[in-house]
Amino acid sequence: MSENIVMSNKSLDTEHIAANITKQASKQTYTTIKYLVDVGQKADAYRAYAYFRWVDDQLDQNDTTHVNRLVFLERQKSLIDCSLWGVQPCAQTPEEQILVDLLRGEHKSDSGLLAYVRNMMAVMTFDVYRRDQFITQAELDNYELLLATAVTEAMHHFIGHNQYSPHDETRYLAPIAAHITHMLRDTFEDIEIGYYNVPRELLAAHDISPSDVAHEAYRNWVKGRVDLARHYFDLGRDYLLQVENGRCRLAGYAYIARFEGVLDTIEQDGYLLKPNYASSKKLPAAMQASWSTISSAFQRRQFNTIQMQNHLSADSTDLS
């Protein structure tokens, strides 16, 4: 994390800072931006990811109080509003300057970038309020939709901007499935910091705790979530077939494949969640084996597919 210093008026290379944050946090995201994002959009794509990676890390610090998290969030929301209103905000850290540079000149209410920023901030806010609290399935569903909306709108904003993509009921299903999978994968890790990814209705009905993953009711619930994620990924593939931009389709398929490896492992374990899925954070072998087939289905673009395949084989830790 960067030191909390008051920023001077001199220009910072926020593209370089954001690219470094992205590369350290998620090799898959870094590679996707490097090879697939539209020309002229790469700097802002790095900024968009890096800023919220930083916000998420700040909120996850165990030595931060609930009140301080809320104060931090309100400051970030104020920076967003000031940037959008054309008021020059005073960034106190390099990461805050990343946000200011990202939103400079972004005023369209229907902007995919603005949808990303607003929905991601709503996700961060919900995380603060849900910490150490049991939440309902309805709240989990809304949480998933917020993140899925952010991910989808960012993808279409940065890859194939202004090209056709369907706006129907299938638009957000693959990212919802990814978030379902992400929460299952991170169950134990999240419990340690006070995030409970299982609905309170299930816990109350069977008098169990969020860590009782071996309980039959818990495992049945996990099976239902895995089945739902599988179904949503299938519908997500159908959605991607209708997306005009080939690079966007490629990014979507790689995104799906990454999380399906986690679902495979959960199924093989009989829906008994485990503390570590490190091996599943690599791009699945099946995706690598079929890379040439998948690539041939897309329009030819000027990026190095072989290099991208090698980069995507690396471990990655993502927001979703």
Image (cartoon, rainbow, N blue to C red):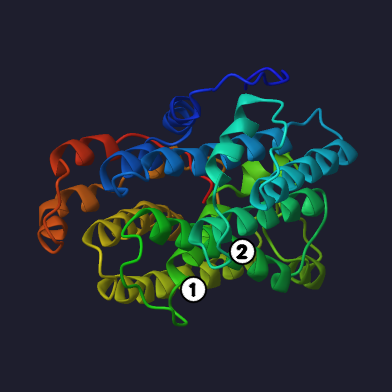
Q: Quadrant of residue 60?
A: top right
Q: Is residue 217 left or right of residue 153?
A: right
Query: Residue 149: x percent and y percent?
Result: 54, 65
Could you tell me the amino acid type at mark 2?
Answer: Leu
Label 2 or label 1, whichever lies nearer to me, is: 2
> Which mark, residue 137?
none
Q: Is residue 269 left or right of residue 95?
A: left
- Mark closer to the chain start, 2 or 1: 2
Q: Which residue is mark 1?
A: 228
Outermost residue on the right side: it is 67
Outermost residue on the bottom side: it is 168
* Above or below 19: residue 317: below
Q: Quadrant of residue 8?
A: top right
> What residue is rendered at 65% in x and 51% in y?
84
* Above or below 227: residue 285: above
Q: Is residue 138 left or right of residue 155?
A: right
Please name whichever residue, 285 or 235, is drawn nearer the observer in this view of the structure: 235
Q: Quadrant of residue 143?
A: bottom right
Please give the count of numbered marks on the rendered protein: 2
The crowding category of the residue bearing disc 2, from other C-alpha atoms within 10 Å (few below 14, some 14 to 19, many at least 20), is many
Query: Residue 184: x percent and y percent?
Result: 56, 55
> What residue is rendered at 23% in x and 52% in y?
287
> What residue is rendered at 81% in x and 39% in y?
69
Q: Which residue is mark 2?
A: 146
Callout 1 secondary element: helix
Could you tell me the amino acid type at mark 1?
Answer: Leu
> What residue is rendered at 46% in x and 72% in y?
173
Query: Residue 112: x percent and y percent?
Result: 49, 61
Residue 195 visible in rendering: no
Query: Residue 7: x percent and y percent?
Result: 68, 21
The Cα–Cα distance between marks 2 and 1, rounded to whole angstroms, is 18 Å
